[in-house]
Image: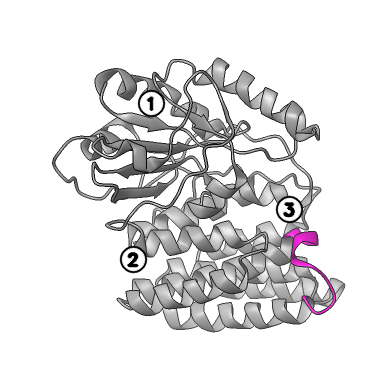
């Protein structure tokens, strides 16, 4: 894994939206991870948590997460129990509890990870009897984490078909909920590479290059770059993307993005104003990426599971996904996928999302 680096935080959006953004690279170098998939997901979770303002969430959530990073289960449990004594089993308590499940997963303690994740899920379902998932950020985070841990634990133990079936079931169950994209991301991590690319909505766009359906790009390799206007890690990849656009003139480059309900500084904004701001951001930071079309659609992010930004994907000339990678990549990691030979899978990532 790479060394920790500096963080450019996203502006703080209302309630649940902050769960989809900016992250810090996890200090998990002492733990051998079972697979690059787990490294990607854990990095996204840590960075998303790190971008939340301290006043927004109880300190116990961060403290349990830190203890889980160190595999100090006794300390994590002590903090969790103390918080429960003072506050009860609130959704914030449940979010803190979910970090124990995630920590156990990335420590490769799969049985315990699944046990805790199932407990988190059951308690989340109990809370959902009196509230909506979209109105409680901590509850959505906890439930999403519980589903994620159970699916990835199956995959990490060689039960890929079971993992796919489980995640497909959960995706159907929560298709209209705020955790749809997160479940879709995990399903894609387990199963998308080697399969046909999902659809792409192209009706709305910004910039001079009009997007076309992916089916119209058959015969060319396609590089997908999902980005967000607030995303510092996305801007950090702009130079790499511009270099690639110049060195691979036949490569189709598509940069999907979406509105989040706010603009600079976290100021809430209606969609037309935000779309105009997206175009300003594109022109300022991504204008040197030749030929990149920029479709604007929330549905694209759901279909592709792009709850992490950036998310990168490479589609071959026949429309098959050869790379699906939540998080940024270096030039050296990405370029081999744009050539004819099939490279080895990258082992780590930097991410700006969940």
Using the numbered discs, state the Cα–Cα distance from disc 2 to disc 1 in whole angstroms: 30 Å
Displayed quadrant of residue 115:
bottom right
Mark 3 in CB contact with mark 2 (< 8 angstroms): no
38 sits to left or right of 93:
left
Q: Nearer the viewer, residue 229 or 274?
A: 274
Would you place residue 261 above or below residue 143 in this image?
A: above
- Tell me residue 320's x, y (percent): 28, 51
Count neighbours of disc 2 (C-alpha within 10 A) and say few if under 14, some if 14 to 19, many if 20 or more: some
Give the mark nearer the N terminus: 3 vs 1: 3
- Disc 3: which residue: 16
Specify the label residue 316 is tagged with: none
Of the residues under marks 2 and 1, which one precedes in the sequence?
2
Residue 170, quarter of the rendered image: bottom right
- Residue 132 visible in rendering: yes
Task: Identify residue for label 2.
Answer: 34
* Residue count near mark 3 (Cα–Cα under 10 Å), binned few <14, some 14–19, many ≥20: some
Task: Give the residue pinned by disc 1.
Answer: 241
Q: Which residues are magenta?
A: 128-137
x and y, in percent, of residue 135 in the image = 80, 60
- Does residue 232 show up magenta in the picture? no
Q: Residues within 10 Å of mark 1 (few under 14, many from 20)?
A: many
């Amino acid at each position: 894994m790479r060394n920790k680096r500096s963080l450019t935080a996203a502006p703080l959006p209302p309630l649940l939206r902050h769960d989809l953004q900016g992250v810090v690279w996890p200090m998990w170098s002492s733990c051998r991870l079972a697979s690059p998939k787990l490294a990607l997901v854990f990095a996204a979770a840590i960075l998303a948590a790190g971008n939340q303002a301290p006043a927004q969430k109880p300190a116990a959530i961060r403290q349990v997460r830190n203890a889980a990073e160190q595999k100090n289960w006794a300390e994590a449990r002590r903090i969790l129990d103390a918080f429960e004594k003072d506050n009860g089993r609130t959704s914030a308590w449940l979010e803190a509890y979910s970090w124990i499940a995630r920590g156990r997963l990335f420590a490769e303690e799969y049985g315990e990870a699944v046990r805790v994740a199932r407990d988190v899920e059951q308690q989340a379902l109990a809370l959902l009897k009196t509230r909506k998932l979209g109105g409680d950020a901590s509850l959505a985070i906890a439930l999403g984490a519980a589903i994620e841990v159970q699916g990835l634990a199956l995959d990490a133990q060689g039960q890929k078909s079971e993992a796919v079936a489980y995640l497909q079931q959960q995706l159907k169950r929560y298709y209209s909920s705020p955790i749809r994209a997160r479940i879709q991301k995990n399903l894609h991590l387990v199963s998308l590479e080697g399969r046909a690319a999902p659809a792409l909505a192209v009706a709305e766009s910004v910039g001079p290059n009009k997007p076309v359906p992916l089916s119209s790009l058959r015969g060319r390799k396609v590089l997908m770059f999902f980005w967000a206007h607030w995303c510092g890690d996305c801007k950090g990849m702009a130079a790499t993307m511009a270099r690639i656009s110049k060195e691979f003139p036949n490569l189709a480059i598509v940069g999907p993005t979406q509105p989040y309900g706010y603009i600079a500084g976290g100021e809430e904004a209606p969609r037309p104003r935000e779309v105009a701001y997206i175009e300003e951001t594109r022109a300022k930071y991504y204008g040197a990426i030749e030929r990149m079309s920029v479709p604007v659609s929330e549905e694209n992010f759901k279909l592709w599971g792009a709850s992490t930004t950036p998310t990168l994907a490479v589609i071959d000339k026949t429309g098959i996904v050869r790379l699906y990678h939540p998080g940024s990549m270096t030039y050296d990691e990405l370029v081999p996928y744009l050539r004819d030979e099939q490279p080895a899978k990258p082992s780590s990532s930097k991410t700006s999302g969940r």
